[in-house]
Structures are given as C-alpha cells and as structure tokens.
Image (spheres, rainbow, N blue to C red):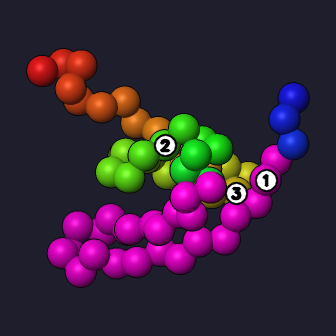
Amino acid sequence: MTEAQSWTVKCQDPADGSGDVIIDMPPDLLATLGLSIGDVLTIEVIGGTIVLTPRPSDSATA
C-alpha cells in the first residue's frame, strides 16, 4: 500500500457558466500521477476528501 499524499491547489472559475473549475496542478504531482496537461478528471467527495480520478479519453471511441 502506498502512503497517502496531500496537495493544496487553487480552483479557478473559468467564468463560462459551466460550473466547471480549473485546477493548476504542480508538475511534480502530474508526473507522480502519470497525468498530462489537458487530461480530464472526475471529482468526487468521499468521506470529506476530494478525490480526482482520470477520465478515459474519448479518442478510443472515435
């Protein structure tokens, strides 16, 4: 089992009325999670913790 890590990031409103948020994630966090700029994540609150999960790209269905 891996040790849980905690990161603090700032959520930004894209001001487009979508209800979405933009989260700038530090490069070392992206590398640790195997994420790239532009990846889409789902967000859930589980037991008071915000959980971000990568969403599969739609390119597999194209």
Q: Is residue 44 visible?
A: no
Asked if residue 9 lies left or right of residue 5, the reply is left
Q: Position of residue 31 (x, y in %)?
A: 58, 46
Q: Is residue 43 visible?
A: yes
Mark 3 or 1, closer to the camera: 1
Q: In the image, what residue type sits under mark 3? A: Thr
Residue 55 falls in which quadrant of the image? top left
Mark 2 or 1, closer to the camera: 2
Query: What's the magenta region?
Result: 4-28
Q: Which residue is mark 3?
A: 49
The numbered disc on residue 35 is 2
Q: Is residue 62 above or below residue 23?
A: above
Asked if residue 47 lies left or right of residue 40, the reply is right
Is residue 44 part of the magenta span, yes or no? Answer: no
Q: Is residue 28 above or below residue 62?
A: below
**Mark 2 secondary-structure assignment:** loop
